[in-house]
Image: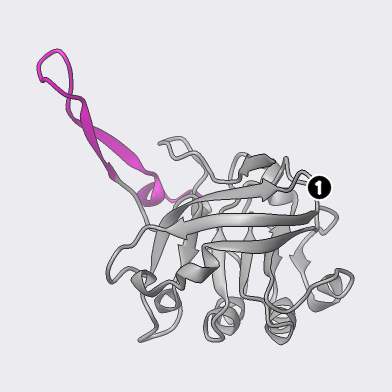
């Protein structure tokens, strides 16, 4: 069995969405040696910084919050699909070239995983791709972008997925993971009332592969 940690490291110099300073995490030491008997700290960070799940409330007024996340999706069979050849966006036509089955959690591997700084032209899943995945009845979609879409004023990709019970996992690091089937272990922090939450995401590769 091989385990891949496909989460982003959280630190003040990490890649954040559109390089916004307010999205940079801050780790603050509140107690330290030798003046104190313990070392303690607290963190201040945006819910959409690093690897995280979006809840419906992020894009849908009155939508569910992250504390209502379907925990059955936290441990799931998943499929990594390689789209590192795509230059702009993943469309329905691109997805039709892959084998996708109902009930799968799909992870989209793109050139995003190979970039250490934020690229304003990051690869995204367009509206047609979201519609196709809805039709295929997948349970979740993960992306190695810090957003699953860009340049879509009405946020069609988010809304199509989230309004149909398809969970969204953003900010994955898939550079070292080959296309294929894995077991995904990933759950957001259980934060009441939040529209998203940080996540530690792991992929397990079966020895039989």
Q: Is residue 40 left or right of residue 87?
A: left
- Magenta residues, start to end: 19-43
User: Was residue 199 drawn as part of the magenta stretch in this picture?
Assistant: no
Residue at (71% x, 43% y) in the render: 175
Residue 73 locus on image (x, y percent): 54, 68
Residue 130 occupies which quadrant of the picture?
Answer: bottom right
Q: How many numbered circles are shown?
A: 1
Q: Furthest-right residue in view?
A: 97
Which colour style is shown? one colour
User: Dot 1, how many residues are within 10 Å of its Cα: few (below 14), some (14-19), or many (20+)?
Assistant: few
Vertical order, 4 against 134 (above or below) = above
Q: Nearer the viewer, residue 122 or 45?
A: 45
Q: Furthest-top residue in view?
A: 34
Query: Is residue 17 visible to the viewer in this orientation of the structure?
Result: yes
Vertical order, 131 against 83 (above or below) = below
Residue 2 occupies which quadrant of the picture?
Answer: top right
Residue 16 locus on image (x, y percent): 49, 48
Q: Nearer the viewer, residue 92 or 120?
A: 92
Q: Furthest-front residue in view?
A: 208
Residue at (61% x, 56% y) in the render: 184
Residue 174 locus on image (x, y percent): 68, 47
Q: Is residue 117 left or right of residue 130?
A: left
Quadrant placement of the N terminus: top right
Residue 45 locus on image (x, y percent): 34, 49
User: Was residue 41 drawn as part of the magenta stretch in this picture?
Assistant: yes
Which residue position holds label 1? 208
Residue at (24% x, 34% y) in the render: 28
Residue at (51% x, 62% y) in the render: 74
Residue 66 occupies which quadrant of the picture?
Answer: bottom left
Vertical order, 146 against 69 (above or below) = above
């Amino acid at each position: 069995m091989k385990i891949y940690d496909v989460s982003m490291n959280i630190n003040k110099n990490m890649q954040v969405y559109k390089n916004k300073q307010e999205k940079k995490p801050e780790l603050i030491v509140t107690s330290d040696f030798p003046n104190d008997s313990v070392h303690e700290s607290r963190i201040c960070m945006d819910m959409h910084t690093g690897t995280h799940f979006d809840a419906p409330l992020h894009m849908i007024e009155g939508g569910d919050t992250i504390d209502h996340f379907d925990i059955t999706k936290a441990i799931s069979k998943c499929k990594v699909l390689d789209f590192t050849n795509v230059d702009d966006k993943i469309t329905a036509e691109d997805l039709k070239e892959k084998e996708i089955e109902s009930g799968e959690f799909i992870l989209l591997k793109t050139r995003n995983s190979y970039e250490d700084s934020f690229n304003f032209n990051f690869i995204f899943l367009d509206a047609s791709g979201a519609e196709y995945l809805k039709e295929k009845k997948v349970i979740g979609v993960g992306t190695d972008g810090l957003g699953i879409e860009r340049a879509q004023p009405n946020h069609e990709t988010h809304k199509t997925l989230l309004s149909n019970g398809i969970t969204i996992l953003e900010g994955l690091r898939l550079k070292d993971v080959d296309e294929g089937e894995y077991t995904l272990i990933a759950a957001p922090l259980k934060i009441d009332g939040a529209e998203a939450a940080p996540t530690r995401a792991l992929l397990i590769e079966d020895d039989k592969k």
